[in-house]
Amino acid sequence: QRDDAARMASKAEYLKSITRAAPENAPDLVVILFDDLGYGDVGFTGNQMIATPHMDKLAANGMVLENYYAPAPVCSPSRAAMLTGRMAPRAGLTHVPFPSGTPLDRLNRFFNNPVRLPREEILIADILQAVGYETAMVGKWHMGDHAGSVPTQFGFQKFFGTYYSNDMNPFTLVSGTAGAGEAISHQAPVDQTNLNPLYAEKAEAFIADAARDKPLFLYFAHNFPHVPLYAAPHEAGRSDAGLYGDVVQGLDDTVGRIVAALKKRGRLDNTLILITSDNGPWWEGRGVGRGRKGVSFEGGIRVPFIAHWPQQIKPARSDALAMGTDLLPTMLAELNLPPPPDRLIDGKSIAATLRGAASPHQVLYHYAAGTLMAVRDRHFK
């Protein structure tokens, strides 16, 4: 992969054109993304074996979208599409990258598959940093580990987490700040029984240390409940759904910790919290309809979604169509910012949808590995 010089220049020009202080009363923004969490794995969608009280409370006081889709049935393309607002083939990451130099990485290169998110892509964090937000990412990146395609080079001022899925070796944790680079902070093998609490601690620290006179953006991307599964000793045996349920309840604990940190910051009422999953579940979890992670049937791409923003969003449930690509244009709309003029944004703003209006979509397109697999309208797929 090579970065396109003209596109890099137009990206820089766009970000310079919007660079300014954040709008007055701009909301804090928090995106919590789970890895392989199924539509039916949480209490607010009907699961009675796994207790998720913190997410259930946010759902009861926010908007739950019941027809929300991940942009791809596997993690890396889904994340790239969500953060850029562009379907994975357009965003340039249609396959899952593997650690540089490993046999699967060499295989990707042999078949000319993309192994990183192109640098010319514009992420939510790039835009928010340009308009005065303090930005941080905690958790799983999985969009490349080299050639400039790491979080602190895409608008995140701080990063703590991993470049890969938790089943890839060597599984290390990385820490970094923009301008100073990123380096390994926890060598392999990482103790994954402590991963949820460690991520929550880092996220809490960012919220606590963020300036009070600036809005913040936190992208909190968990590694779980992707397999292999690990639970801390105090989490083991808590659910009625075995180890998988214990892990999901541990994830819910981290949501509670984030909400508590935002309350302490004093801006929870003006914080937009978005909670969802990168794709459907693997065999341990519970999806909806046919199929699982990796396929474009409902089970592979229809995922849970909560939007919580007390000042702006009333409690409701909606069957309106929406997709992960909608997050970037929605944030642009909320901040009254123009989209990049040099590239097509596939997502549409769901700002009005989150307040009870109809979906802006007539149809949704479902891609897998660069191929159009399905089209969904209100009634048919």
Image: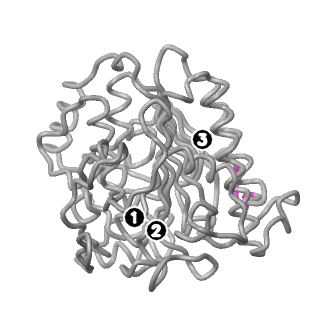
Residue 169 visible in image: no
Task: Specify few, some or many for label 3: CA neighbours under 10 Å numbering under 14, 14-19, or 20 or more.
Answer: some
Q: Amino acid at mark 2?
A: Asn
Q: Earlier in the sequence, mark 3 or mark 2?
A: 3
Between residues 339 and 266, which one lies in front from this camera angle?
266
Q: Which of pointers 1 and 2 lies earlier in the amino acid sequence?
A: 1
- What is the distance, in whole Å, between disc 3 and disc 2 at their CAs? 26 Å
* Residue 207 is a magenta residue: no
Identity, as a three-letter code, of the amino acid under mark 1: Ala
Nearest-to-viewer mark from 3 and 2? 2
Give the residues drawn in magenta, as a range: 186-190
What's the residue type where badge 3 is placed? Ser
Residue 175 circle label:
3
Callout 1–callout 2 Cβ contact below 8 Å: yes
Image location (x, y in percent) of residue 60:
57, 49
User: In the figure, is residue 124 to the left or right of 259?
Assistant: left
The residue identified by callout 1 is: 70
